[in-house]
Image (spheres, rainbow, N blue to C red):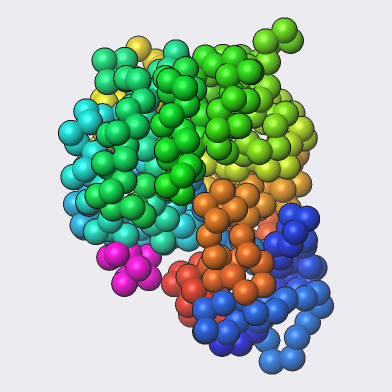
Amino acid sequence: MTGVLAAATVAVPDRDGVALHEPGWLALERGRVVDAGPGTAKGALHLDGVVLAPGFVDLQVNGIADVDFAAADPDGWRRAGRLLLGHGVTSYCPTIVSSPLGTYGPTLERIAAARADAAQRGLPAIAGAHLEGPFLGGAPGAHPPELLREAQPEWLSALLDGDPDIVRIVTLAPEADHNLAATRLLVSRGVVVSLGHSTATYDEAIAAADAGARGVTHLFNAMSPLHHREPGLVGAALDDDRLTPTLIADLVHVHPVALRLAIACKRNIALITDAVAVESGAVGGIALSEGDGAARLADGTLAGSLLTMDGAVRNLVAIGVPLVRALEMASSVPARVLHTDDFGDCGLGGRADLVALEPTTLAVRAVWIEGVQLRGPEVWT
């Protein structure tokens, strides 16, 4: 699309975060946002009463509805893409939980094929796979302990050689990475290392950050709690600006007070869903079911969420987080983790992946990918 979109509220990323123009406009050209500003613009297409923002980026999603990304067929990937699009997601990292080492190669081949197919069909971009394990530590959560192991740099190197661009994030525990050799290898290959499922001390977490780790997976969950004499991974995540922690804001995994405290403490925090295909009854072969607002194992252990990205934004606003922060956490912060070229990361000049939300309910009204409207009203008034 080439033209100008105007709305009652427009969220525009900049170096300081996200600015709200009320009203505002975006100028699009060849699938990019080339200009933006407050007020009105001549010849603009007016999107009646919406909040126009960068599209949402989900760094950790295992599946949706009955589509488990560990086992999805081509039709399943397409259905999942359409469902995610309806929740404002324009890029995502399909996430694979701890599995036998021999299964990763074929799974990544299917993700690579799904990524190419999505690009041709105007579906949300598959930014690359997120491998959550199997190199996890003393807080396995729902991951079967028998599948966990010490990190194997040689295996990782061979896996990355198979398709150098398909793995974007690896969650591992510092205590499972001897001398942090796997962390250094992954960082040297352009993979984001996120620390998680760990009982690492604060010093161990900082050492991992020194080695190049840049994320912390689902802050507060599957890690030692913050202690005033041993801050642990939680303390490192909130204190070290190099680390971008992620949060599951379903109000089940993390109490609203802990959400507010973390968000008040640090700017670069990203929302994730950690959603699972609860209708399929499994995530990566691990049996689960719905219980008390989340997915759980038979013994009640949390095993992922039922959350959507637009739902996460609504939840944050409902507990008192300013809308501009919630939008930033759903778009710009995760986009910067991946170093994408979309509007959320780059601002002007970025790919025009956009979402329009109802101003009161924050329900998704329309979505654009590369400037092409894929969901929403055919005619705006």
| Left or right: residue 53 compared with residue 89 | right
Q: Is residue 362 visible?
A: no
Figure label count = 0
For image coordinates 37% across by 47% down, the residue present is 167
Does any portion of residue 321 appear in the rendered image?
yes
- Tell me if 169 is positioned left or right of 21 in this view: left
Nearest the viewer among 308 and 18 is 18
Q: Quadrant of residue 65?
A: top left
Residue that protrudes farthest toward the top in the picture: 229
Residue 139's place in the image compared with 62, above or below, is: above
**Picture coordinates of residue 88 (x, y %)?**
51, 58
Helix, strand or loop for the magenta stretch, by majority = helix
In this rendering, would 339 be left or right of 155? right
- Where residue 172 sits, quadrant-wise, is top left
Picture coordinates of residue 259, whole percent (x, y): 67, 31
Looking at the image, which is closer to me, 280 or 182?
A: 182
**Residue 363 falls within the magenta-colored stretch:** no
Residue 337 x/y as whole percent: 56, 48
Work out whether 227 lies above or below 50. above
Please provide the residue range marked out in magenta. 116-123
Point 22% across, 31% down: residue = 101
Return the x and y of residue 125 as percentages of the image width and height.
Answer: 41, 61
Say above or below: 213 vs 144. Answer: below
Quarter of the image for the C terminus: give it.
bottom right
Residue at position x 73%, y 42% from top? Answer: 267
Kindly give the residue lying farthest to the bottom in the view shown.
43
